[in-house]
Image: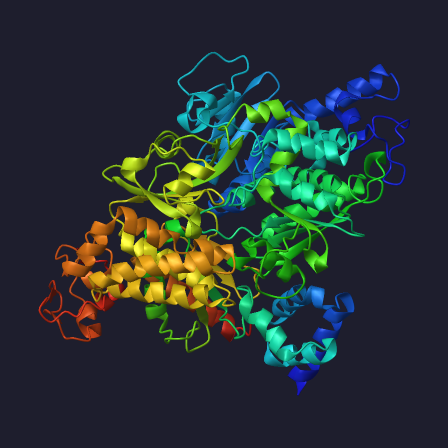
Amino acid sequence: MDKCCSRCWHTPEYPCKHYIRCRTEGPLCHDSPECRAKRERRINEIKYGRYGLKIKVPIASCTLAAGAKEVYNAVVKEVNSSGLNIDVGITGCIGLCHIDPWLEISGKDLPSVIYANVKPEEVPKIIKEYLSKDLSRAFAIRSRGSTPPSKVPLLEELPSWSNQVRFVSRNCGVVNPESIEEYVAFGGFKGLEKALNTTPKAVIETVKRSGLRGRGGAGFPTWIKWDIAQSQVSDVKYFIVNADEGDPGAFMNRLLAEADPYRVVEGMIIGAYAIGASKGYIFVRAEKPLMAERLSKAVEEARKYGLLGRNILGSGFNFDIEVILSAGAFVCGEETALIAAIEGRTRPRQRPPYPATKGLWGKPTVINNVETVAHVATIFQVSVDEFVRYGTEKSKGTKMFCVTGSVRRTGAYEVPIGITLKKLVYDLAGGPPEGRNVKAVQVGGPSGGCVPSDMLDTPVDYETLQSAGAIMGSGGVVVIDDKSCMVDVAKFFTSFTLAESCGKCFPCRIGMKILYDILNNITEGRGSEEDLEVLTELSDAIVGSSLCALGGTAPNPVKSTLRYFRDEYIAHIRDKRCPAGVCARLVEYWIDPTKCVGCGLCARVCPANAISGERGKPYAIDRSRCIKCSQCFITCPQGAVTKR
Amino acid sequence: MSVVSDVDTVISNILNRYNSRQYLMRILQEVQSVYGYLPREALEKLSSIMKIPLSDIINVATFYHQYKLEPPGHYVFLVCMGTACHLKGNQDNYNVLRDALGIKEGTTTSPDGLVSVEKARCFGCCSLAPVIMVVSRDGSERYLHGYVNIQEARKLAFKYRGLASSKKKSGG
C-alpha cells in the first residue's frame, strides 16, 4: 500500500486515525485532485488490472487439489507468450466446489466471466474467445458490462448463487487473499476504524444488537462472552481464534481464512479491543498449511501497516497476534482443551470457571470461531441493520454451510439462518445425482444427527435442529442416499468420536467404546434386540455425565439414527440383512461373469475355498461356504466381485 | 553414535529458538520436520534439557494426530476418512491399499519400509470424494487423487511402491 503523496505521515510509530478511510476516500488531511485521481486509478487497477483486463485464478487448498496451479501456470504462460496486456492474479475459493478449477476474466466496461472446470490446454482458446466476445464456453457471467444478453446465465440467476446471501463470504473468490491493499480497497479494516472510534462497551453493545451467536457449534451469544471478559479486572487478557477446524465434511473456516484472511484478523482486533486483550492467538491446524500461511502473512502485513502492535490507528490500544500451529485433535474444539494445547498440555478440564474469567494461563480469555470473528468484522464494515435483516428471531444473520455427499453441486454456501434443509440440499446443491434418492441429511458433523428425508422442511437454526436431534455444529451438511446404511453411518461417527475421545472422563472413554462395539456387532450380524435398549440408555448416560461437550454430543448420531431409522437396525438384527448392501458381513458376494477375466486371484485368497473356476473363464462363489470376509472383493483387479 | 550426536545438535538448534513448555507443540513439530517422526532419543533429550518428565512429552506426542513415533515410508498414503469420502467407499480403498502393500495388522508401514498407509481427517475437497493424498516423507511432493475406486487404489499402491523403491535405490 503506497502513500498518495509525501504529505501522508502515517507510520506504525505515529499512526493516523483516518489511515484506512483515506485509502478509499482520501486524501482526507489535505485537498489534492492529483492524490484523489491517483487513489481512484489505483483502485481501478486492483479491480480491473493495470491494462483494464484481468484474469483471476483461485489458489486455495480445494482448487489446487482440482488442478488450479496448472491452470494458473497455463494462464501466465499464455499471457507472456502472446504478449497480451493482461494482469494475472490469484484469488480465493468461491465456494462452488463443483466448478473447480475455475477462472474469471474481467475488465473495465467488459463483462466479467467465469469459466468452470478449466483444463490447462483450454486456456489459450478461452482467452481468445473472450477477446473476440464469444462467451459460449463460459459457466456464468458475474456482470454483463456492455455486452448483449446471451445464452450464458448470469451468476445471480443460478440457483446455487441466487439463494445465497454473501455477507461474510463477500470477498471469497473476489479479492487476492495475500494483498492487504486489495482487502482495504474492498472496504477492509473500515470496521476496525469505526470500532476504535467508539468505546469497548459500545462495541459490545453493537454486537449485542446484532444478536450474533457463535458460529463454531453451540451458538452461544458472542456479546455475553465478551461482556464477561470485559468486566474482569486483570493485567492481561487473551483473545483466541479457533481455526483448528476438525469436523469431517466441514471446511468453511478453511475456505474463509484462505480466501479472506484479513477479515479474520480485523474481527479479532475488534474483539480484542472490546474485551481489552493485549495478546491474541490464532490456533490453526498444521495439516492445513495454506490456511496457516495466509493467516500468518495477514498478521505480518497488518503489523507492517500499524494495524497490529502499539497504539493501533492512534487509539492508544495495543494488541498483537501470534499464529500457533495445532498438531490436531478434534477435542480442541472444546475451549478448555484448546487452551491446554496452547499451554503445551492436553485434554479439557471441568467448567466453570469458564475461560472468560479464567482461561489461558489463568487469565480472562475469549475464544471465538473463525466465522464468528469474520462476521464481527463484516458487521462493523457494513452495518448491524444489514446483518439483522437475515435470519430468524432467535438466530440472526447468515451462516456458511458445506453441503457434501450425494449431491450434484458440492459446495460451501452462505445462506440466511432459518432456510430449510430442502432448499439447501435441492436448490443450492442440486439434489442427489440421477437415480438416487435422499434418505437422510446429516447435520453438524460427528456431534450432530441425521434428519430423515421426510423432515427436510426443517428450518436450519440452532433450536429447531436440536429438537430434531441434530445440531448446527460448524455447518457440515452431508447428504446420505439410499446406497448408504444408517447403522454404518452411526458406526462411522462413533468410531470417529471414539478415536478422538481424550480419555480423561470415563463416560466418554468407555461409553463410546461400548457403543461402538454394539454397533459393530449389529453390522456383523451379531446384534440382539436388547442391544437397542442398551444403546439408548447408554447414549443418555454419556450425554448426561461426560466432562465436556465432545462426550456430551458424541452419541447424537446413534440417538438420531435409532429414532428415525430403527427399521434398518431391526433388519440387521432380525433378518441379518443390510438393506443398503453396505455392511460386509450381511451382504452376498457375487462375481459378475461379464467382468471376470478368470485370473483366479480371488480363489487363491479365499480362506474358505468357496471360489472355484477354470483359468480364463468366469469364476463363481459357493455361497454355502462363503464366510463373507470380503477378501475377494478387495483383491479382484477387475472389480468383478460385487456386493448385493 | 553418530545419530545421537546428531540429535544433540538438532535439539539444541530448536531449543535456541523456543525453550519453554508453552512451545512444546511447536518444538515437537520442528523435531518431526527434521526426522519425519519423533525418535525416542530426541524425546529423552528434550525431557532432560527442558526438565519436563518424559511421560508428559509422550503424552503430548501421542495425543495429537500430527506426531508419528515410527519412521514413515518414502511415500505416505493419506486416506481421507471424512464423512463424504467414507460414504463413497474410502474404507474399501483403505483396505485395498493395505492388502496390496502387505501391511500387517497393527502397523501402518509396509514390511519393506517403502510405503505407509494412514487414515486422515477431512481435507476439505469433498467434491472429489473419495480422496487419497500421497505425500513424500519430506513433504516436498504432494499428489491428490480424487474419485478413487478399488481398482485405482490398487494401481496407486503399486505405482508409489515402485517410485519409493527407485528412491531408496538412489539413496533418497
Residue at 75 percent across and 40 percent down: it is: A273
A487 displayed left or right of A358 = left
Whole-percent x, y for residue B35 in the image: 60, 72
- Most extreme residue toward the bottom is B1
Residue A34, above or below B139: above
Say how many tags the image has.
Answer: 0
| Between A105 and A404, the one nearer to me in the picture | A404
Rendered location of residue A412, percent (x, y) = 47, 38
Q: Which of A453 and B131 is in front in this view?
A: A453
Please report the residue visible at 42 percent of the width from the left and 24 percent of the height from the top. Answer: A158
Any part of residue B98 in sight: yes
Residue A612 percent coordinates (x, y): 11, 70
Task: Indicate the quadrant where residue A558 lies.
Answer: bottom left
Q: Is the N terminus of chain A in the top left, top right, bottom left or bottom right quadrant? A: top right
Identify the colour scheme used: rainbow
Q: In which quarter of the image is the C terminus of chain A?
A: bottom left
Seen in the picture, residue A228 relative to A185 is either above or below; the reply is: below
- Out of A572 and A12, give the one closest to the viewer: A572
Q: Is residue A617 left or right of residue A362?
A: left
Image-based side of A515 in relation to A278, left or right: left
Residue at image position (74%, 70%) is B15
Provide residue A335's location: percent of width, then percent of height.
Answer: 59, 54
Work out whether A520 lies above or below A69.
below
Q: Is residue A181 visible?
A: no
| Residue at x 41%, y 68% (from the top left corner) | A510
